[in-house]
Amino acid sequence: MSGYYRRDPDELREEGSGGLSLSGPRNPVPDAKLVELKPLGYPIREPGMGKEVVVDSYEAFNAYAREQWLGEIVKEGMILFDTGIVHSYAFKVVRVVPSGAGRVTASTKFVLRLRSEEDRMEVPRLTLDDVVGHAEVKRACRLLVEYLRNPEELSEWAPRTVLFHGPTGTGKTRTAKAVAGEAKVPLLRINAAELLGKYVGEASERIRRAFKRARESAPCVLFVDEIDALGLDRRYQELRGDVVESVNSLLTNLDRLKERSEGVLFIAATNHPDLLDPALKNRFEYELEFRPPDREEREELVRYYAKRLPLPLKVDPAYIAARTSGMSHREIKERVLKRALLEALRDGADAIEKEHVRRALREEGGDRRGRQVYHG
Ligand SMILES: Nc1ncnc2c1ncn2[C@@H]1O[C@H](COP(=O)(O)OP(=O)(O)OP(=O)(O)O)[C@@H](O)[C@H]1O
Ligand SMILES: [Mg+2]
């Protein structure tokens, strides 16, 4: 069985096939150009059967979907069942372009909306005080917050496009959230790598939608994480024809954003600013650099997290700061503090003592030597 909406065979005969009959009064159902499906899972399953589907090739998925649902009339809200590989797996039809309902033809494009990807838009709870160190970056960010609070005030001089760059784990994502949180506006976050990885053929459409959604929710922050995936990744360029289209879509939307005072702040983050498409890089009015923490910042970072750890930290933050030179914020948080906490918990201790920190650092020391060799 395919869709639960089954057509009468007579209806089929009368209507004929193909798009020619589109405007005829006997055929009010247009051809579906694009059908977006959301995987729901099985109506019933045995424990142990996975719920998620994995698609390796969207081209193949399209051919597969068309073949089994060809001629079917699909409508937003209805449920389609897979008849092939993942038998009885249910998909909900979430969108049918152009008009909410349509017939699947040989040229209908299918798109999957994966669960993890549904855009969430909320006001983050972090504020700039939750970003430790980065004094210069935060100074610039206070301006951005001002703009978000009073988008009209600066009109065409308002900052609209900002690039955060710097090594991994230095707080770019955290700071983008903090800017929105500080201004008390929602953050719409899209990840460029995920966008390209999962939405083959629809990335540019999703970019357009993200900008539209941002405009509708203004003032807000539109945050594109790992933007280099869009601007540069050779793997994608070779594998996929839509990278250029996606970059162009981004450029067009950015230009539009800059022409008008719409209260949307566009922040993008990357670890590789030098590899970005030059046209893209040029669009940014500000570039803010995130550096690994210096000794003072490391000490401050330890103090900040000490207040949030579930066990008291009975170690001088200066001791940890002195032994974590070269580490990123993330490494200090996750590889030192978190590990020390786990060591303490493993010992059944009621506080994190120097010994636990030492063990965490020793482990990390081993790791770091390994990584240096790896990187040559
Ligand atoms: N300045 C900071 N103050 C407090 N916590 C921080 C800071 N920077 C990073 N962290 C913490 O370290 C972790 C990594 O930070 P984040 O994800 O923001 O880094 P990033 O620069 O976006 O890294 P990537 O380039 O890998 O995406 C998070 O848990 C974050 O909360
Ligand atoms: Mg990040």
Image (cartoon, rainbow, N blue to C red):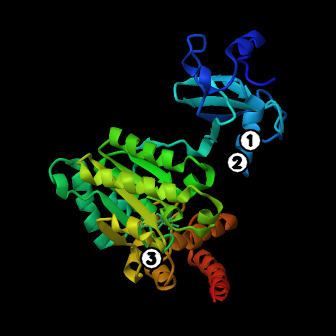
Point 59% across, 57% down: residue: 241
Q: Residue at label 3?
A: 274
**How many numbered discs, if any?**
3
Q: In this view, does 349 lie above or below 197?
A: below
What amino acid is at disc 1? Ala
Whether the residue carrying mark 3 lies under 8 Å from ligand 1 is answered with: no
Q: Nearer the viewer, residue 218 or 344?
A: 218
Q: Is disc 1 placed on a helix, strand or loop?
A: helix
Q: Residue at label 2?
A: 59
Q: Nearer the viewer, residue 306 or 297?
A: 297
What amino acid is at disc 2? Glu
Residue 373: horizontal and vertical position, in percent? 66, 88
Point 37% across, 51% down: residue: 253
Q: Nearer the viewer, residue 222 or 327?
A: 222
Q: Residue at label 1?
A: 63
Quarter of the image where one finds residue 32? top right
